[in-house]
Image (tube, helix red, strand yellow):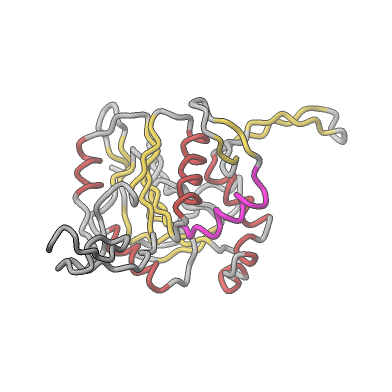
Amino acid sequence: MPKDKKQKQTQYGDPDSIIKFNKIKWRKRLLVSVATEGWVRIEWANARYGQIIPVNWEAQGFDIQYTALGYSIDDAYNLIVQRVIDLDIEWLIIIEDDVIVPNDLFLKFSRYMNKGEYPVVSGLYYIKGQPSDPLVFRGRGTGAYTKWKVGDKVWCDGLPMGCLLIHASILRWFYENAAESYNVVTGEVVRRVFETPKKMLYDPERGGYERQDGTQDLFFFDKVIEHDVLKKTGWSKVARKKYPLLCDTSIFCKHVDRNTGRMYPY
Protein backbone atom coordinates (compact mmCIF):
# COMPACT_ATOMS: atom_id res chain seq x y z
CA MET A 1 0.00 0.00 0.00
CA PRO A 2 1.43 3.46 -0.89
CA LYS A 3 2.81 5.34 2.09
CA ASP A 4 0.70 8.40 1.34
CA LYS A 5 -2.57 6.43 1.37
CA LYS A 6 -4.39 6.80 4.63
CA GLN A 7 -5.96 3.73 6.11
CA LYS A 8 -8.38 3.48 8.98
CA GLN A 9 -6.89 1.62 11.89
CA THR A 10 -8.72 -0.11 14.71
CA GLN A 11 -7.66 -1.23 18.16
CA TYR A 12 -7.19 -4.68 16.63
CA GLY A 13 -4.69 -3.49 13.99
CA ASP A 14 -4.91 -3.54 10.18
CA PRO A 15 -8.58 -3.98 9.10
CA ASP A 16 -7.39 -5.88 6.01
CA SER A 17 -5.44 -8.37 8.09
CA ILE A 18 -6.23 -12.08 7.70
CA ILE A 19 -6.51 -12.24 11.51
CA LYS A 20 -10.02 -11.73 12.86
CA PHE A 21 -10.13 -10.84 16.54
CA ASN A 22 -13.04 -12.01 18.67
CA LYS A 23 -14.26 -9.09 20.77
CA ILE A 24 -16.06 -11.32 23.27
CA LYS A 25 -14.72 -10.98 26.80
CA TRP A 26 -14.19 -14.53 27.96
CA ARG A 27 -15.59 -15.44 31.35
CA LYS A 28 -13.10 -16.55 33.97
CA ARG A 29 -15.14 -19.44 35.29
CA LEU A 30 -12.60 -21.27 37.42
CA LEU A 31 -9.59 -20.64 39.62
CA VAL A 32 -7.47 -23.56 40.82
CA SER A 33 -5.51 -22.61 43.93
CA VAL A 34 -2.93 -24.13 46.24
CA ALA A 35 -1.78 -22.94 49.65
CA THR A 36 1.71 -24.28 50.32
CA GLU A 37 4.81 -23.79 52.44
CA GLY A 38 6.86 -24.04 49.27
CA TRP A 39 7.70 -27.69 48.68
CA VAL A 40 5.61 -30.65 47.61
CA ARG A 41 6.23 -34.34 47.05
CA ILE A 42 6.58 -35.76 43.54
CA GLU A 43 3.46 -37.87 44.17
CA TRP A 44 1.50 -34.67 44.74
CA ALA A 45 2.92 -33.01 41.63
CA ASN A 46 2.12 -36.05 39.48
CA ALA A 47 -1.46 -36.08 40.75
CA ARG A 48 -2.01 -32.33 40.39
CA TYR A 49 -0.48 -31.91 36.95
CA GLY A 50 -1.50 -35.31 35.60
CA GLN A 51 -5.18 -34.40 35.67
CA ILE A 52 -7.48 -35.45 32.84
CA ILE A 53 -8.66 -32.15 31.40
CA PRO A 54 -12.38 -31.98 30.52
CA VAL A 55 -13.24 -31.38 26.88
CA ASN A 56 -13.17 -27.74 25.76
CA TRP A 57 -11.53 -26.51 28.93
CA GLU A 58 -8.97 -23.71 28.74
CA ALA A 59 -6.26 -25.12 30.97
CA GLN A 60 -3.30 -22.90 30.21
CA GLY A 61 -1.94 -19.77 31.80
CA PHE A 62 -1.78 -18.21 35.21
CA ASP A 63 -5.25 -16.68 35.12
CA ILE A 64 -6.73 -20.00 36.22
CA GLN A 65 -3.96 -21.07 38.60
CA TYR A 66 -2.86 -19.30 41.76
CA THR A 67 -0.46 -20.43 44.45
CA ALA A 68 -0.09 -18.75 47.84
CA LEU A 69 3.42 -19.74 48.93
CA GLY A 70 4.98 -19.36 52.36
CA TYR A 71 2.09 -17.68 54.18
CA SER A 72 0.19 -18.67 57.29
CA ILE A 73 -2.89 -20.75 56.51
CA ASP A 74 -5.22 -17.80 57.15
CA ASP A 75 -3.22 -15.36 55.03
CA ALA A 76 -2.88 -17.90 52.21
CA TYR A 77 -6.60 -18.54 52.04
CA ASN A 78 -7.45 -14.84 52.24
CA LEU A 79 -5.01 -14.09 49.42
CA ILE A 80 -6.78 -16.75 47.37
CA VAL A 81 -10.15 -15.13 48.11
CA GLN A 82 -8.74 -11.76 47.03
CA ARG A 83 -7.68 -13.33 43.74
CA VAL A 84 -11.19 -14.73 43.26
CA ILE A 85 -12.64 -11.26 43.81
CA ASP A 86 -10.12 -9.46 41.59
CA LEU A 87 -10.68 -11.82 38.65
CA ASP A 88 -14.45 -12.11 39.19
CA ILE A 89 -14.23 -15.90 39.32
CA GLU A 90 -17.32 -18.12 39.39
CA TRP A 91 -15.91 -21.31 40.94
CA LEU A 92 -12.85 -22.03 43.09
CA ILE A 93 -11.02 -25.35 43.43
CA ILE A 94 -8.65 -25.66 46.37
CA ILE A 95 -6.05 -28.44 46.49
CA GLU A 96 -3.82 -28.47 49.57
CA ASP A 97 -0.19 -29.47 49.26
CA ASP A 98 -0.53 -32.70 51.23
CA VAL A 99 -3.64 -34.06 49.50
CA ILE A 100 -3.09 -36.46 46.59
CA VAL A 101 -6.13 -36.09 44.34
CA PRO A 102 -7.41 -38.69 41.83
CA ASN A 103 -6.64 -38.03 38.16
CA ASP A 104 -10.33 -37.59 37.27
CA LEU A 105 -10.89 -34.83 39.85
CA PHE A 106 -11.38 -32.06 37.27
CA LEU A 107 -13.80 -34.26 35.31
CA LYS A 108 -15.99 -34.82 38.37
CA PHE A 109 -15.82 -31.23 39.58
CA SER A 110 -16.62 -30.07 36.04
CA ARG A 111 -19.89 -32.01 36.13
CA TYR A 112 -20.85 -30.34 39.39
CA MET A 113 -20.07 -26.92 37.93
CA ASN A 114 -22.09 -27.62 34.78
CA LYS A 115 -25.15 -28.78 36.72
CA GLY A 116 -24.88 -25.92 39.21
CA GLU A 117 -26.95 -27.67 41.89
CA TYR A 118 -24.54 -27.66 44.84
CA PRO A 119 -22.31 -24.76 45.89
CA VAL A 120 -19.90 -26.79 48.05
CA VAL A 121 -18.47 -30.20 47.12
CA SER A 122 -15.51 -31.92 48.74
CA GLY A 123 -13.51 -34.99 47.92
CA LEU A 124 -12.90 -37.58 50.61
CA TYR A 125 -9.71 -37.93 52.59
CA TYR A 126 -8.67 -39.10 56.05
CA ILE A 127 -6.61 -37.75 58.93
CA LYS A 128 -2.91 -38.55 59.07
CA GLY A 129 -2.79 -41.03 61.92
CA GLN A 130 -3.87 -44.42 63.23
CA PRO A 131 -6.74 -45.02 63.35
CA SER A 132 -7.27 -42.91 60.26
CA ASP A 133 -10.75 -41.42 60.41
CA PRO A 134 -12.51 -39.72 57.48
CA LEU A 135 -12.76 -35.95 57.54
CA VAL A 136 -16.54 -35.88 57.24
CA PHE A 137 -18.57 -34.30 60.03
CA ARG A 138 -22.10 -34.00 61.30
CA GLY A 139 -22.11 -31.81 64.39
CA ARG A 140 -19.18 -30.70 66.53
CA GLY A 141 -17.59 -32.76 69.28
CA THR A 142 -19.17 -35.91 67.83
CA GLY A 143 -16.18 -37.35 65.98
CA ALA A 144 -16.11 -38.34 62.34
CA TYR A 145 -19.33 -39.31 60.59
CA THR A 146 -18.89 -42.83 59.20
CA LYS A 147 -22.36 -44.14 58.26
CA TRP A 148 -21.70 -44.37 54.54
CA LYS A 149 -19.81 -46.45 51.97
CA VAL A 150 -17.13 -45.28 49.56
CA GLY A 151 -18.89 -44.06 46.45
CA ASP A 152 -21.78 -42.47 48.35
CA LYS A 153 -22.64 -38.79 48.27
CA VAL A 154 -22.73 -37.74 51.91
CA TRP A 155 -24.44 -34.63 53.27
CA CYS A 156 -22.71 -33.05 56.25
CA ASP A 157 -22.11 -29.73 58.01
CA GLY A 158 -18.32 -29.82 58.23
CA LEU A 159 -15.68 -30.55 55.60
CA PRO A 160 -11.95 -30.07 55.13
CA MET A 161 -10.62 -27.84 52.34
CA GLY A 162 -7.84 -29.98 50.93
CA CYS A 163 -9.89 -31.02 47.90
CA LEU A 164 -12.76 -28.58 47.60
CA LEU A 165 -15.02 -27.02 44.99
CA ILE A 166 -16.85 -23.91 46.19
CA HIS A 167 -18.97 -21.35 44.39
CA ALA A 168 -17.50 -17.86 44.60
CA SER A 169 -20.82 -16.30 45.61
CA ILE A 170 -20.27 -17.68 49.12
CA LEU A 171 -16.79 -16.20 49.41
CA ARG A 172 -18.00 -12.94 47.89
CA TRP A 173 -20.78 -12.63 50.49
CA PHE A 174 -18.27 -12.83 53.35
CA TYR A 175 -15.88 -10.50 51.55
CA GLU A 176 -18.57 -7.84 51.17
CA ASN A 177 -20.54 -8.30 54.38
CA ALA A 178 -18.58 -9.93 57.17
CA ALA A 179 -14.84 -9.54 56.77
CA GLU A 180 -12.54 -6.79 58.03
CA SER A 181 -9.55 -5.61 56.02
CA TYR A 182 -5.99 -6.29 57.18
CA ASN A 183 -2.45 -6.50 55.80
CA VAL A 184 -0.65 -9.79 55.29
CA VAL A 185 3.05 -9.95 56.13
CA THR A 186 4.07 -8.94 52.61
CA GLY A 187 1.86 -5.85 52.73
CA GLU A 188 -1.09 -6.78 50.54
CA VAL A 189 -4.49 -5.73 51.81
CA VAL A 190 -6.97 -8.60 52.06
CA ARG A 191 -10.13 -9.30 54.00
CA ARG A 192 -10.45 -11.78 56.83
CA VAL A 193 -12.82 -14.26 55.21
CA PHE A 194 -10.86 -17.15 56.75
CA GLU A 195 -9.38 -17.30 60.22
CA THR A 196 -8.27 -19.99 62.63
CA PRO A 197 -10.19 -19.59 65.89
CA LYS A 198 -7.90 -19.04 68.87
CA LYS A 199 -9.77 -17.31 71.66
CA MET A 200 -9.99 -17.23 75.44
CA LEU A 201 -13.43 -16.24 76.68
CA TYR A 202 -14.62 -15.58 80.22
CA ASP A 203 -17.83 -17.40 81.15
CA PRO A 204 -19.50 -15.50 84.03
CA GLU A 205 -21.97 -18.32 84.68
CA ARG A 206 -19.20 -20.82 85.25
CA GLY A 207 -16.84 -18.31 86.77
CA GLY A 208 -13.92 -19.27 84.59
CA TYR A 209 -12.25 -19.01 81.20
CA GLU A 210 -13.10 -21.09 78.16
CA ARG A 211 -10.66 -21.78 75.36
CA GLN A 212 -11.95 -21.89 71.79
CA ASP A 213 -9.73 -23.16 69.02
CA GLY A 214 -10.04 -25.25 65.89
CA THR A 215 -9.34 -25.19 62.18
CA GLN A 216 -10.12 -22.55 59.59
CA ASP A 217 -12.24 -24.90 57.48
CA LEU A 218 -14.74 -25.97 60.16
CA PHE A 219 -14.85 -22.42 61.52
CA PHE A 220 -15.67 -21.11 58.04
CA PHE A 221 -18.46 -23.62 57.45
CA ASP A 222 -19.89 -22.90 60.89
CA LYS A 223 -20.17 -19.25 59.83
CA VAL A 224 -21.75 -20.23 56.49
CA ILE A 225 -24.54 -22.02 58.37
CA GLU A 226 -24.80 -19.49 61.21
CA HIS A 227 -25.26 -16.54 58.81
CA ASP A 228 -27.55 -18.51 56.46
CA VAL A 229 -25.20 -17.62 53.62
CA LEU A 230 -26.42 -20.36 51.27
CA LYS A 231 -29.92 -18.91 51.25
CA LYS A 232 -28.65 -15.35 50.96
CA THR A 233 -26.58 -16.26 47.89
CA GLY A 234 -29.35 -18.04 46.02
CA TRP A 235 -28.83 -21.67 47.08
CA SER A 236 -32.18 -21.95 48.88
CA LYS A 237 -32.83 -25.63 48.09
CA VAL A 238 -29.52 -26.70 49.59
CA ALA A 239 -29.86 -24.23 52.48
CA ARG A 240 -33.00 -26.04 53.67
CA LYS A 241 -31.02 -29.20 54.36
CA LYS A 242 -29.94 -29.94 57.92
CA TYR A 243 -26.55 -30.92 56.49
CA PRO A 244 -26.01 -28.65 53.46
CA LEU A 245 -22.42 -29.53 52.46
CA LEU A 246 -21.69 -32.39 50.06
CA CYS A 247 -18.84 -34.89 50.24
CA ASP A 248 -18.53 -37.02 47.12
CA THR A 249 -16.73 -40.08 48.49
CA SER A 250 -16.04 -41.37 44.96
CA ILE A 251 -13.42 -38.58 44.83
CA PHE A 252 -11.07 -40.61 46.99
CA CYS A 253 -7.88 -38.77 47.94
CA LYS A 254 -4.79 -39.74 49.87
CA HIS A 255 -3.43 -37.62 52.71
CA VAL A 256 0.36 -37.70 52.54
CA ASP A 257 2.92 -37.08 55.25
CA ARG A 258 5.27 -34.84 53.31
CA ASN A 259 8.30 -35.88 55.38
CA THR A 260 7.93 -39.66 55.21
CA GLY A 261 5.75 -40.15 52.13
CA ARG A 262 3.30 -42.33 54.05
CA MET A 263 -0.21 -42.15 52.64
CA TYR A 264 -3.34 -42.17 54.77
CA PRO A 265 -5.39 -44.28 55.04
CA TYR A 266 -3.04 -47.20 54.53
Residue 52 or 144: which is nearer the viewer?
A: 52
Question: Where does residue 99 sit, x and y in percent of width and height?
Answer: 33, 43
Which residue does the image show at 23% across and 41% down from the upper left?
45
Instruction: Residue at the far left: name it.
Output: 1
Which portion, as a residue range, is magenta? 166-179
Question: Where does residue 31 sit, x and y in percent of width and height?
Answer: 38, 53
Q: Quadrant of residue 200?
A: top right
Q: Is residue 122 above or below residue 15?
A: above
Q: Quadrant of the N terminus?
A: bottom left
Q: Quadrant of the C terminus?
A: top left
Q: Quadrant of residue 132?
A: top left
Residue 30 located left or right of residue 117: left
Which residue does the image show at 81% across and 27% down from the upper left?
208
Which residue does the image show at 39% across and 63% down from the upper left?
27
Q: Is residue 61 above or below residue 189?
A: below
Query: Residue 162 magenta-drawn?
Result: no
Which residue does the image show at 28% across and 45% down from the upper left?
100
Instruction: Residue at the far front: name it.
Output: 4
Residue 182 or 114: which is nearer the viewer?
A: 182
Residue 21 located left or right of residue 202: left
Question: Where does residue 261 sit, x and y in percent of width and height?
Answer: 25, 32
Secondary structure predominantly adopted by residues drawn in magenta: helix
Query: Residue 176 magenta-drawn?
Result: yes
Q: Is residue 141 above or below residue 138?
A: above
